[in-house]
Image (cartoon, grey):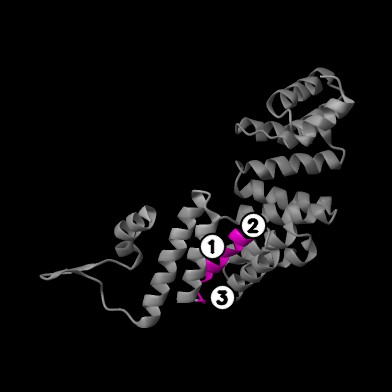
Amino acid sequence: MRLERVLLGLGLCALLGGCVTTGGGPTLPTTSKAQEARNAARVHTELAQHYMQLGDLQSALEKLKLALQFDDNYAPAHTVIAVVYERIKDIPDAEENYRRAVELEPKKGAPNNNLGAFLCRIGKSAEGLPYFKRALADPFYATPDVAWLNDGICRMQLHDVAGAENSFRHAIALNPKNPEALYQMAHAKYLENDAFHASAFLQRYEALGKTSPAALKLGYEIELRLGDMDAARNYNKRLQSRFPDSKQAQALNATASP
């Protein structure tokens, strides 16, 4: 396929660590069979990610299976194939591969965060929490705010609102422009009956140019609690206008006047 020819032609040298040119033309550097297998797994995983960006999950899955045939110990391939399996609703295979990635890289932040978040998504929230702690123990983990955010979301599912708020605060401290953390904090403050601070965090969320049906409905509910009917009606109007088919819009449409 054209995509494969382009990627293999332009990216293979870089993925393999560079090509060596001799008088007889370009040749690959000498590598061991294990390294060749790892390189092949890496190339096919990269191809799979491109197919995923194109929305072609079937081709992505084929490339990832091939990657793991070359090197079953290549953790990134297990992570990416887990994502594909989750998207096609194959939860058992998704879980198996998320767990395999952690087995292969037990001290790395990303695999632990990914597994923890997955477990929360499938209703195993209590089991997922320790993996966020492991992710945060990695001093080289590039996005610790994401692990704190996921930890908070997991705790919300366990109805630990105070614990969730603490995690969201950590996430926001590390990345004040994390929109999901700001929204989740607004939701937590609303559940704690602190509508004033809930409104403040939601305003910070909206200042980033973000919106969603859930956020607009939350804004409506916050303003109702604050007693600002004009602001509440404005949130409902925006919700009905921008997301008329959303479950949030339909819920408010049935109970409130725009």
Query: Which of the 4 image quarters holds residue 11?
Result: bottom left
State the image coordinates of residue 144 (x, y, percent, origin top left): 60, 56
State the image coordinates of residue 245 (x, y, percent, origin top left): 74, 31
Magenta region: 72-88
Mark nearer the viewer, 2 or 3: 2
Q: In the image, what residue type sits under mark 1?
A: Leu
The answer to whether mark 2 and mark 3 are in CB contact below 8 A is: no
Report which residue position mark 1 lands on: 61
Query: Is the C terminus in the top left, top right, bottom left or bottom right quadrant?
Result: top right
Is 92 situated above or below 4? below
Label 1 or label 2, whichever comes before in sequence order? 1
SS at mark 1?
helix
Q: Is residue 211 visible?
A: yes
Report which residue position mark 2 lands on: 88
Residue at 44%, 60% in the rendered image: 46
The answer to whether mark 1 and mark 2 are in CB contact below 8 A is: yes
Q: In the image, what residue type sits under mark 3?
A: Leu
